[in-house]
Image (spheres, coloured by chain):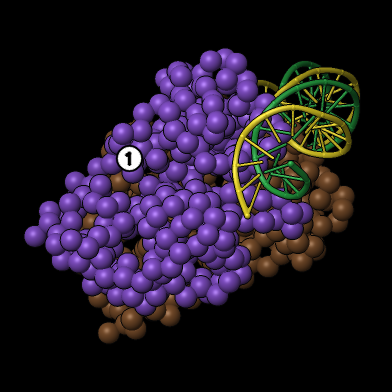
Chain colours: A purple, B brown, C green, D yellow
Amino acid sequence: MPESCLADLLGDLAPLSAEERAVLVRLEEREKSFRRGAAILRENDRLTEVFVLRRGTAMSYVLLDDGSRQIMAFHYSGDLLAMSALVYRHSSQSIVALTDCMVSPIERGAMAQVLLDQPRLAALILALTQIERVALTDRLAGVGRTSARSRVAALLLMVRDRLRALDPSIGQTFTLGLTQEEIGDATGLTAVHVNRMLRQLEASELIAREGGRVTLVKEPALIVEANYVNRYDGIDLGWLPPVD
Amino acid sequence: MPESCLADLLGDLAPLSAEERAVLVRLEEREKSFRRGAAILRENDRLTEVFVLRRGTAMSYVLLDDGSRQIMAFHYSGDLLAMSALVYRHSSQSIVALTDCMVSPIERGAMAQVLLDQPRLAALILALTQIERVALTDRLAGVGRTSARSRVAALLLMVRDRLRALDPSIGQTFTLGLTQEEIGDATGLTAVHVNRMLRQLEASELIAREGGRVTLVKEPALIVEANYVNRYDGIDLGWLPPVD
DNA sequence: CGGTAAATTGACCTGGGTCAATAAATGTGG
DNA sequence: CCACATTTATTGACCCAGGTCAATTTACCG
């Protein structure tokens, strides 16, 4: 059976009909691959399509004019990228592949067609953007009001949970796949200070590290310190009509 | 003709059919008023409805367990509040009236019905949430990577633009309607430092203040300092089918 | 095996926080 | 319309979490 990564993600929220799956598979017909470090989209590029990330991880960020960077999100398989193409003519952010990536570009018109013809899918996509919005508010609260240590802890938990959603075999140990500079640009810190916080978390025996892999040694304590909530949990789409 | 504040807001994005307007008017049938300072929704409350803000201004925020507060957004007439009710059973944030407010509660089921039956409206609401998401990423970049002065300037511009969208007669002078503590909680600063930045902006003759009213004396310079973009501008919904 | 990117550490600095004391503004009841 | 109470704004003195700079070390890569 042909497959759709977006369907896998939406299917975690609610059951999909065969027709809905077929529609999503068709959306991901085209494919484009990007090498690690390659730009999937650049700030100010003309926006004509949205993307589904099919394989690999990516990040979106903005560059400020003093050269500093704020990473807005890390993206994993199934994520919809550049959804702002539905609203704006030009991109306000850049999207770059963190690992080699496979991406399906979707013409804005094709996406629009699906939104208009498939009300359940449109509702699910709206639900997904709400999840992402709440996750973004969590990050805003973290950056605005919590300590460096807490922000780094929150980022570790967030990455682990995203990875686990794709691979349930992942437990406390995982490959972070980010440099300390990237962690800093996501949390509003410097790479130097991220390093200090990681070593401090390690010294406090909340985490362990070896060769790019991180272990959450005392996950409950980390969750408390980070004020962390997994926003992909506790979803309730009871109002969505059951599949035909 | 009966009216809908949400229709006014969505109508700025794209023309609405008479039927669509009628549907929106029906959504705002019920009304509930809140005094300044009253809680429209409290963190952890059971979520059973979303709201349209019909009159007044409000804000949503989270409280962290050290007692600090992060304000996520200020809300104005027409805004959809508590949209996360579509996804979660309990609220992750509080919403409080900043002025006396009139609000229309909408049962989650009623909102769902509209999303499923009115694909153009669903698409417009999705578009609106994208605008809000991009505005939120701007704020994240501001809090994560810019100076206190720049964040305060950005907030002033943002509030002015929101007010102006509702009342085009507003020029460079407007009533902020926020305490310095609220500005601080929105920008990740302390009230004391907000005060210093406001006086500094005043001393630099970028703004003027008198009795709660702010004037943007040198708006272009402020926009540059704040790295500000009005995300309600430059919308392109060309893909949306024309009204019947 | 060199060469570049990433991590680590130490010394020192600073933007913004903290604390505390007034002053101004805004309400409120009488 | 006034006296008092409560927020809100303002200012100064001082502090510290996190930034900056610079030097190594370690890991990765063709």
Task: Judge whether B198 appears above or below B121 on screen.
Answer: above
- In the rendered image, residue B38, in percent from the top left (x then y), is placed at 44, 37
Q: Quadrant of residue A46?
A: bottom right
Q: Nearer the viewer, residue A176 or A81?
A: A176
- In the rendered image, residue D23, in percent from the top left (x then y), is placed at 87, 31
Q: Nearer the viewer, residue A129 or B188?
A: A129
Would residue B225 appear left or right of A108 to someone viewing this image?
right
Q: Amino acid at mark 1?
A: Asp
Q: Is residue B127 visible?
A: no
Which image quarter is the N terminus of chain B in?
bottom left
| Element marked by disc 1 | loop
The residue at the far left in this view is A244
Disc 1 packing (10 Å; few <14; some 14–19; many ≥20): few
Q: Quadrant of residue B89?
A: top left
Would residue B121 appear left or right of C28 to someone viewing this image?
left
Would residue A91 appear left or right of B212 to someone viewing this image?
left
Q: Is residue A89 visible?
A: yes
The residue depicted at 77 percent of the width and 54 percent of the height is: A66
For mark 1, what is the residue? Answer: A167
The residue depicted at 70 percent of the width and 56 percent of the height is: A64
- In the rendered image, residue B27, in percent from the top left (x then y), is placed at 27, 60
- In the rendered image, residue B5, in percent from the top left (x then y), is placed at 40, 63
Task: Judge whether A106 appears above or below C11 on screen.
Answer: below
Which chain contains the residue that carries disc 1?
A: A
Total numbered badges shown on the rendered structure: 1
Which image quarter is the C terminus of chain B in?
bottom left
The residue depicted at 47 percent of the width and 36 percent of the height is: A175
Task: Judge whether A211 appears above or below A66 on screen.
Answer: above
